[in-house]
Amino acid sequence: MRPLLKVIVFVFPSWIFAATQGTLGTTSTGTVNVSITIPALVQITGLSDITLGSTTAFPATGSTTACIYSNVASPLGSYYVTATSQNTSGTDFRVKDSGTDYIVYSAYWNNSSAASQTTALTSGTKTAQQTGGSAVSLTCGGSANANFNISFSSSQVQGAPAATYTDVVTLLITPT
């Protein structure tokens, strides 16, 4: 009985999942199994640079809208955000002048186009799952569905030397 059992184990997988072949006759029918795997995909587009210019009114705020596409199924259109400051120190977002001076600032994510301070960001840290991404259009139908915004408080800029300060923030969108 043991040799027969070995034959069944080796033959069983090959005929249950494979294409079937037709037989000789006036017609012949075969079958082909078709499968495709669509991975979870995300995309961020529609970003603009944030330039605050010279200001004496605080808080000084700026924002950019974005289009987030996500084909994640549960919940539909969901995604995660990791924002990373080029000038980070620990988890702080910082702008830098041409020398060695830095100013810490606050950064936020909103899963709608409004520039509200919904989700506080820490540099290099992934957010909780966000919803509201478009699952049907790579261009979000021409409308923004997310917002990245920043804020400088008077206490953050107090004592900073006069200069132009800059940063580059990388916004990484992931499906998981």
Image (tube, rainbow, N blue to C red):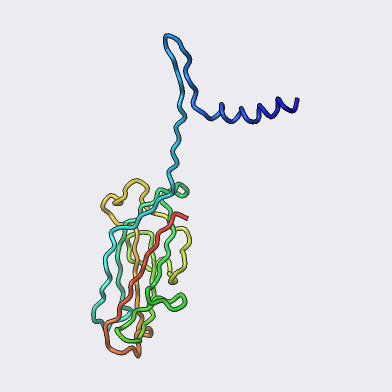
Outermost residue on the left side: it is 54
Residue drawn at x 48%, y 15% as measured from the top left: 23
Residue 165 higher or lower than 115, as above or below: below
Outermost residue on the right side: it is 1
For the N terminus, the quadrant is: top right
Asked which quadrant contains residue 16, the reply is top right
Q: Where does the image place residue 37, in percent across and percent down from the top left?
A: 45, 41
Q: Where does the image place residue 139, in percent across and percent down from the top left?
A: 29, 51
Outermost residue on the front side: it is 3
Camera-side residue of 89 and 27: 27
Residue 147 higher or lower than 19, as above or below: below
Residue drawn at x 74%, y 28% as measured from the top left: 2
Camera-side residue of 60 and 82: 82
Q: Where does the image place residue 115, in percent across and percent down from the top left?
A: 33, 66
The answer to whether residue 48 is left or right of residue 80 is: left
Q: Where does the image place residue 35, in percent across and percent down from the top left?
A: 45, 35
